[in-house]
Image (cartoon, rainbow, N blue to C red):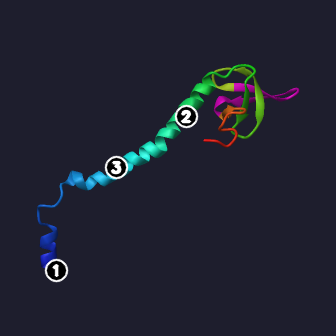
Amino acid sequence: MTTYLLVAAAPGGPPAIMQLMPLVMIFLVFYFIMWMPIRKKQKALEQLLGSLKKGDRVVTSGGLYGEVVKTDDSTVILKLAENVKVKFAKRAIAGLEGSPEDQGGN
């Protein structure tokens, strides 16, 4: 048992940076596969929300389809049907009607 402890504590093993390299590589792969596409999609949605205008056909995150009647900084009024207008937070808009995300694409 004492011999094992001496061997485990002996110098000459790989440097500490080399022991951490697999963990760093896993983190980098995870970042590029998972987080980059999510950030890209969020930026595209922010741009879409900033450029909403009257007449745009949109889909809400709740699945309601409507036409933009009026927008301001944080809200949008959608016309869902004849004489049915509803006020939504801009963050509730999931995308434009007919966009690839709306049809189940990536």
Q: Position of residue 59 (x, y in %)?
A: 72, 34
Amino acid on which disc 2 is placed: Gln
Q: Residue at x 38, y 48 (%)?
A: 27
User: Disc 3 marks which amino acid?
Assistant: Met
Task: Provide the residue designation for mark 2.
Answer: 42
Q: Secondary structure at mark 1?
A: loop
Question: On the picture, is 97 further left or further right than 48?
Answer: right
Residue 82 painted magenta:
yes
Query: In the rendered structure, which segment of residues is drawn in magenta?
Result: 76-91
Mark 1 near mark 2, Cβ–Cβ under 8 Å? no
Residue drawn at x 67%, y 43% as measured from the top left:
104
Q: Give the residue number, with chain letter if any, for mark 1.
A: 1
Q: CA distance from mark 3 to mark 2?
A: 25 Å
Q: What residue is rendered at 11% in x and 66% in y? A: 10
Answer few, some or many: residues within 10 Å of disc 3's Cα (few below 14, many 20 plus, some between 14 and 19). Answer: few
The image position of residue 69, as x and y in percent, is: 76, 21
